[in-house]
Amino acid sequence: MDLVYDWKAFTSVFGIRGSVPRRQDSGHVLVVADNGKVVAAYAESEDLTSWTGSRCEKMAAEMPHRKLVVLEKKSVDGLLEGALSHPHYHGQFEILAKNAAALTGAGASIREFCTFSQKHFLLTAMSGWWTRILPSYYGIFVSLGASRQVLLTVRKGQVESFLNPEGERPPLEAVKYLSEKHLLPVQGIFTSAEKWNKLSEAPNPWPGIFEAIRGDEIRLVPYNRKLLCLLAMKAYVGV
């Protein structure tokens, strides 16, 4: 039986793997505070537990080169409670990122605390401009090989579930099988893990995606002419 929310499969495809490690003395620091004291502090690849119990002012003074994004514990508790209304982790994080940014005015900086939280280009597209041509309810099957594949079901631009359809089938057969099993149209994307990782780390992946499709490094199954035209416009016109 397939898991409806297979987080391992999801992160195997959409987890962004930065090739250059971040210096531990740079970037943002997320601080949860209660009455001016640090309850928890977090930054990617750093252990900041020694700051627990310290005054926020002291922490800021000793880290003048860092930007501290401070959230009050009471507000964080409210954010967490509100996010639980969504059934899976990806949706919960999207709610947290949006609401936390609104609370602090930090905007996109909320996503800088964890590399896995950076929004993948495909997830951004599905919740945005792909809604112009794709059905209101459909599936996206991304296969980088049998060990890295995931089927997303998407409803009105929002990820509804993500699962790992066990086994490996030829592309046409795999898409047909998944479409019939889950009773929805499925768009398949097939490529190598190396190509996918490279595109996932690119600041603007769309020109590379379009050229990879033209060069058969990425296969769209079924072939979707409307989607290809939209990819070309995104790659070279930016719309």
Image: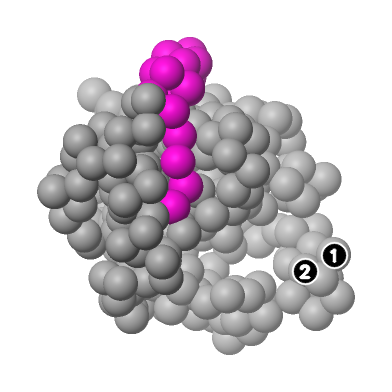
Quarter of the C terminus within the rendering: bottom right
Considering only vertical position in the picture, is 165 above or below 239? above
Within the magenta stretch, is there residue 83?
A: yes
The span from disc 2 to disc 1 (Cα, nearest Å) is 5 Å
Query: What amino acid is labelled 2 in the image?
Result: Lys
Q: Which numbered tag is attached to residue 239?
A: 1
Quarter of the N terminus within the rendering: top left
Q: Quadrant of residue 221?
A: bottom right
Q: Secondary structure at mark 1?
A: loop
- Left/right placement of residue 112 relative to residue 187 reads left
Q: Secondary structure at mark 2?
A: helix
Q: Is residue 192 visible?
A: no
Q: Which residues are magenta?
A: 68-89
Q: Which residue is mark 2?
A: 234
Pointers 2 and 1 in contact (C-beta within 8 Å): yes
Give residue 126's position: percent from left, percent from top. Answer: 64, 46
Q: Residue at x 35, y 43 (%)?
A: 56
